[in-house]
Image: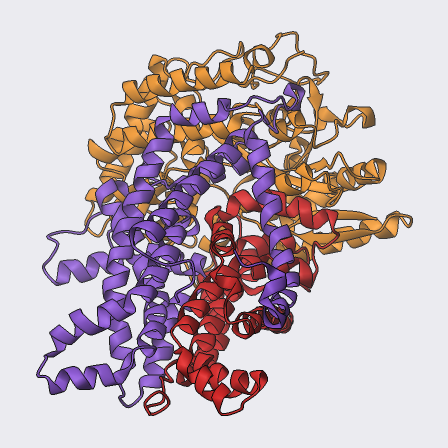
Chain colours: A purple, B red, C orange
Amino acid sequence: MKKISRLGHEARLGWTLVAPALSVIALIAIFPLGWTFWESLHLHELRMPWLGKPFVGLANYVEIAKDPRFWAALGHTAFFTVVSISLELVIGLFLALAMNRVFRGRGFVRAAVLVPWAIPTVVAALLWRFIFESQGGIANALLVDAGILKQPMVWFIQTSTAWVPVILSDVWKTTPFVALLLLAGLQNIDLTLYEAAAVDGANAWWQLRHITLPLLKPAILVTLIFRTLDGFRVFDLIYVLTGGGPGTSTEPVALYTFNALLQNLRFGYGSALSVVIFAITFGLAIFYVRGLGVRLGGEE
Amino acid sequence: MNNLRWQRWLFGAALIVLMLFTLFPFYWAIVASLTSDAALFRNPAIMGFILAVTMFPQISIVSPLYLLLRSLHLIDTYPGLIMPYMTFAMPLTVWVLTGSIRQIPKDLEEAAHVDGATRRQSFTKILLPLAVPSLATTGILTFIYCWNEFLFALSFTLGPERQTVPVAIALFRGQYQVPWGEILAAAVVATAPVAAMVLVFQRRIVQGLTAGAVKG
Amino acid sequence: MLTFSGSALGAEGTLVARQLQRFMQLNPGIHVELQRTPDDASQRHQLYVQWLNARVGNPSILQLDVVWTPEFAAAGWVLPLDKYAPARGEFFPATITANTWAGKLYALPWFADVGLLYRRTDLVPNEPKTLEEMVKNAQAAMARRGGPRYGIVWQGARYEGLITGFVEYLGAFGGRIIDEKGEVVVNRPEAVRALEFMRDELYATHVAPLDVLTWHEEEARFAFQNGNAAFMRNWPYPVAAMSDTAQSKVAGKFAVSPMPASGTAPNGHSTAALGGAQLAINAYTQHPDAAYKLIAYLTAPEQMLERAQAVGQYPTRPALYDDARLRGAVAIPLDNARRAIESATPRPVTPIYTELSEILQIELHRALVRQAEPREALNSAAARINALIDRTGMRKLMSGATKDSTPSGTSPAASSTVGHAE
């Protein structure tokens, strides 16, 4: 294990430069984490201060384990994350490849592609809600005209159809982000590899499979990690679009936590929920890192 | 609409400053990563920690953060917003940048070293230009994240001087009414700077490895 | 130095600023600042929770939604007002009940929102006397050539608005959510019938479109305003927009009245859900006395009248409804307005209201989208609400010692709520 003193001037310089930033991050990040862990071990109902704030150990967690609404929310979150990410990766890759080429007006195309992601989430959610809103809404009108639907339907009152606008709006909004990340990764691929392959007679599909994708793996993995973490924390979008409905069938864990914390004022229970979400996303990150071979450590 | 425009100007001005200050600490930390050969960022504990920061849902963090910022008297101040933004936008930046920096071949640096370049020269003339696409990418991603972030801005600011665009938009809403015209207008105004930034940066983003830099 | 938290949107913003100015002139030692908070209820609630949890004394005056008062009172976040001897009798009893917890008054009612039935006078000239008559009128209107697409529209999305609508049907059939003794009675036969009636509007008589199950206030307003509905259930706020000939197709062609009772229920009575805002004093403020002066000023008759004239919001003082000056301000006949507020029913007055409401919202919505039968849904709701009450130990507090400790002179049995406890 290298000791800092042995690393010499460069590394020390590095540490000195990052130390302030890291300490700010540590403060801003560690304090809430610690506070939340601590709260989760207590009973803390803001509405009932006469109950005090007794230490209850893991009682909140036990309650979570027995709470069917939590498990349902977990399922919804997982479903949403998997479907969204899959779509976003595929479409994003396609977009990134397209943006990588030289063509006239590509600057504007790239800017235009980023617009959905630049719109504040709440506004985007409201827009999509508007599109799918009522039987006379745009989505219905288009689908009926195209003959796909026989008659307009009310999207938000059935679980299966309520997911459609949710996922669509997330994909619409986040694919640009994914495309951008993948594009950055594409930039790092040496063009000569393609030339060599073309000389050897490989077609585009082969190039994609054997050159692009493997070399894009680091970028794909970064994207996967961050999108999974984001997906698991989805809140604004669903809050505005369905409010978790119909019933609670589109409710993600973050929305359930919001309810517990800020609507029902159950800080102890809500904090425990937060910790559970943290643990799950942590587990997922570890899975990505170990299982899919992202290297956190040095390469050489 | 006039009333709105005038207020928008205020918000916008506040925002620009905010954004500038937000981006600076980033870049500065990134510089550090470049200079130390990314050795620091190969440390799994640090990388893991940075990543863990993004694993809590925002709403869980708002209350304790509010308590913390308040005790530091940072509510309704620029640093009070910048610090959380920095913290929560940093992981992505760090990961993307270290990923792309690692892909810059060592030979380049060594070649420069052999040619007698100082550390600083090899940094500014070799590493930095090659890192520009990733810097541009993460710059945009960070900018957009800060521009559109709502929950922290709502919770940590109090008055029009510090409120950001999404908060301003939220304040248009009546109890039941959603003033569509105003909200969409605001969204357009809000998106314009971002789109402009992207246009400016997009060339940088797509700058690839200049052919010949590695070969020979 | 006081801070007043309120909306600064449009006409209301100008009005508040004006009233605050006058207050400052009348009270030279007190300076008041307006701190803008979002009008969206749940955002404002979130901010309040954050601030009060951190024991922040600003804003000194909180604008509370009608169902928040007991919650804030129990949490110790707002001050009891009894020591200032506010004139309780001068306000509508239901509004006072909604702001009383454990026998103490915690907020002054500022303006009232009540659920109202809007109808197209060109299609339905006479006010329906019963719910059944309303449905028949709706069907007849829809059947006419060139008639509207929908019979009645309301807010049926899975949110608080659904409860306010449900409360009206509930009262129409003589049901309640929680009775005076603190017992959960939302699964009694009357309640089941009320829910069945709502469901039938969707699936049996087809007077309400399935869309309403995703609608909030604005969507319903658009439907009615564009001439697509014969009836609408909504708060008073749409009246202004709908009377504007520039944007409304129904200007001059609609009238407003309280929701009727059911003709088939002996205990049913015309009911309006009570909404509106109340003003309370932040428990952590440094200047409680000055704060009380301000809220007393803002809820004084002249200010309420001015508010009615400026933004059309209903005063919470019955005496004003005899005042001729109110006539032009409130866009519906004064008599209808007063009747509506007098029939106003607060939702259960308890600190755990948000959780209770959530349970009920979920079950009601399930019944309305036909994921469950009404009886089953309400039984499930009752069971879960009971579990909630037991878990939070609210049972004792909510089973009022019906020794009514409110010294109000006029408190008829409009106290369809719990909250008087010792």
Quadrant position of residue C72: top right
Horizontal and vertical percent position of residue C321: 63, 36
Q: Residue at x 24, y 85 (%)?
A: A192
Horizontal and vertical percent position of residue A119: 43, 66
On screen, residue B140 versus residue C306, left or right, reads left
Q: B136 or C300: which is nearer to us? A: B136
Q: Is residue C337 visible in the rendered structure shown here?
A: no
User: For the image shown, how many numbered marks are present on the structure?
Assistant: 0
Q: Is residue A288 visible in the rendered structure shown here?
A: yes
Q: Is residue C367 above or below residue A108?
A: above
Q: Residue at x 71, y 32 (%)?
A: C78
The C terminus of chain A is located in which quarter?
Answer: bottom left
Horizontal and vertical percent position of residue A53: 64, 24
Quadrant position of residue C213: top left
Quadrant position of residue C56: top right
Q: Is residue C31 above or below residue B128?
A: above
